[in-house]
Every structure is written in structure tokens, then in C-alpha cells.
Amino acid sequence: MNNTITLPQAIFKKLEKISAETRLTPQSIIKQAIADRIEYEEWKLEQIDAGLAELKAGKGIPNDEFWAKIGAVKNARKKAA
């Protein structure tokens, strides 16, 4: 299946430069970039679903406890710096 996409000129120029420097075809660079992004988005959605499932199972912490932990980490970092 062949599809066509339109790239902004600035991105196309960067793609051409990378292609010339790496000896990879622009098509192979684009295919890999799209595959990597899709894999990342799938992973991200799985992580979101897992987090929501944990919350539904009661494994979350109250909001005020969360912010207290964040504050403690910030204070520890300030003291260490």
C-alpha cells in the first residue's frame, strides 16, 4: 500500500540531510520514525490503562498525601544541592 504525506519544507530538508549523512533512504527513516511513534503511543495507552485499573482497585493515594511526598522530595533535593 502506498500513501502520500506532505511534509513542511523545513522537515523535508532535515530529512534529506539525515538521509545523505546516514545513507538511509528518506522512506526508511520515515517508516522507522512512524513505527517508533506508534510503538510509543501504544505503550503510553497501556500505561494509562494500567494506572486507571490501579486507581479503580484502590491502589492510589489521596491527593494531599501525593503533594506531601512531592514536597518532601523537593526539600530533600534542595538540601542536597
Image (cartoon, helix red, strand yellow):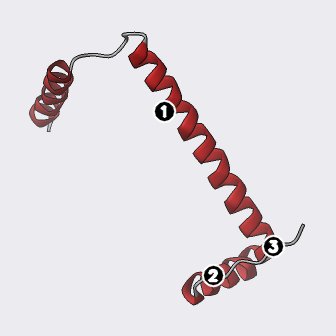
Q: Position of residue 17 (x, y in %)?
A: 66, 83
Q: Position of residue 79 (x, y in %)?
A: 9, 32
Does 58 sit above or below residue 10?
above
Residue 24 visible in image: no
For image coordinates 14% across by 22% down, the residue present is 64
For image coordinates 90% across by 66% down, the residue present is 1
For image coordinates 71% across by 77% down, the residue present is 5
Crowding at dot 3, Cα within 10 Å, few <14 / some 14-19 / many 20+, comes out as few
- Dividing the picture into quadrants, the one containing residue 59 is top left
**Mark 3, secondary structure of its residue:** loop
| Residue that badge 1 annotates | 48
Q: Quadrant of the C terminus?
A: top left
Q: Label 2 vs label 1: CA separation?
A: 30 Å
Res 60 label: none
Q: Label 3 vs label 1: CA separation?
A: 31 Å
Crowding at dot 2, Cα within 10 Å, few <14 / some 14-19 / many 20+, comes out as few
Which amino acid type is shown beneath numbered disc 3? Asn
Which amino acid type is shown beneath numbered disc 1? Ile
| Residue that badge 3 annotates | 3
For image coordinates 62% across by 87% down, the residue present is 13
| Residue that badge 2 annotates | 7
**Mark 2, secondary structure of its residue:** loop
Which amino acid type is shown beneath numbered disc 2? Leu
Front residue of 46 and 15? 46
Residue 46 located left or right of residue 57: right
Front residue of 23 and 49? 49
Q: Nearer the viewer, mark 2 or mark 3?
A: 3
Disc with the residue nearer the chain's start (2 vs 1): 2
